[in-house]
Amino acid sequence: MNTTPGRPEPEIEQAFDRLVDEGQERLERPLLALVSTGLLGGIDVGFGVLAYLIVKEHTGDTILAGIAFSVGFVALLLARSELFTENFLVPVSAVVARSGTLRGLARLWGITLAANLVGGLLIMWILITARPDLEETAIEVGTHYAELGASLESFALAVLAGAVITLMTRMQHATENLGVQLVPAVLFGALLASAELFHCVLDSLFMMGALFAGADFGLGAFAGALGWSLLGNLVGGVGLVTGLRLLRVPQRVEEEREHPDAS
């Protein structure tokens, strides 16, 4: 219940404070820590891709494969690694509260995305080398994303993907209970893969696997899909979810801007 007219529930303001504190920590993270968490993020998602391809190969069911993929998001949470798209809500909140800079945000995003892709490239090469029986399925799945193209439909899929991951992040930061945090990791990880949303890191791994398996689309299609999905993810994660969430705590944002060390 509100104690001050015009202010949101205390729990919402407390969640915002946690976002700002963690966002400031991420923005100030040393280079080696950024690179290592990003590499591990790509590798951890790769294990989710492995689970997805195995279930898809044996059942042909995208929904079951998507549920299996959620193991990748569980690994991300428990291993404290990071995906590029997990760095929308938290560090952006810190920048809006003037507890970080746009330059620091660009550094965080650029390094994390690059490290995710490098880690993903490594794990997908190992995956296809170790399980050549999955090559046909890997080509089918990866080619699907490579051929989505730059259309309104694919952009909407990318917007939804960015919104889904950012909403997952918000729900996980509503509590400090690790068991409760696992619930959105499983649910939203399964939703992302089952609905075949257009996610810049996950679908890049699918396309990498397809290329290693001998798919006939080229690097141009890969780069185009990566760039288009990246743009849509930013719109969905930063614009659709983060921006609207910050509108719920305007007074707290203003207080942080005036006294950034108060929290």
Image (cartoon, rainbow, N blue to C red):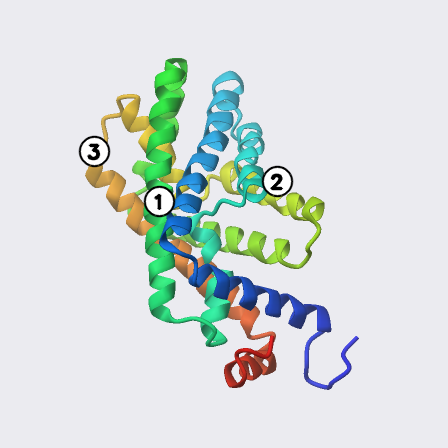
Classify mark 2: helix, strand or loop. helix
Q: Which residue is mark 3?
A: 218
Q: CA distance from mark 2 to mark 1?
A: 23 Å
Pair 3/2: label in front: 2
Element marked by disc 3: loop
Count every numbered label the image shows and give the total: 3
Left or right: 53 in relation to 7:
left
Three-letter amino acid code at disc 1?
Ala
Residue under label 2, please give it. 186
Left or right placement of residue 196 versus residue 138 in this view: right
Disc on the earlier residue, 3 or 1: 1
Could you say where residue 114 lies in the image, as x and y percent from the top left?
32, 47
Q: Residue at x 68, y 76 (%)?
A: 8
Q: Quadrant of residue 70?
A: top right
| In this picture, residue 5 sits left or right of residue 217 | right
Whether residue 143 appears in this view of the structure is no
In the displayed structure, 104 sits above or below 77; it is below
Closest to the observer: 181 or 197?
181
Task: Give the residue at the far top of this rendering.
Answer: 133
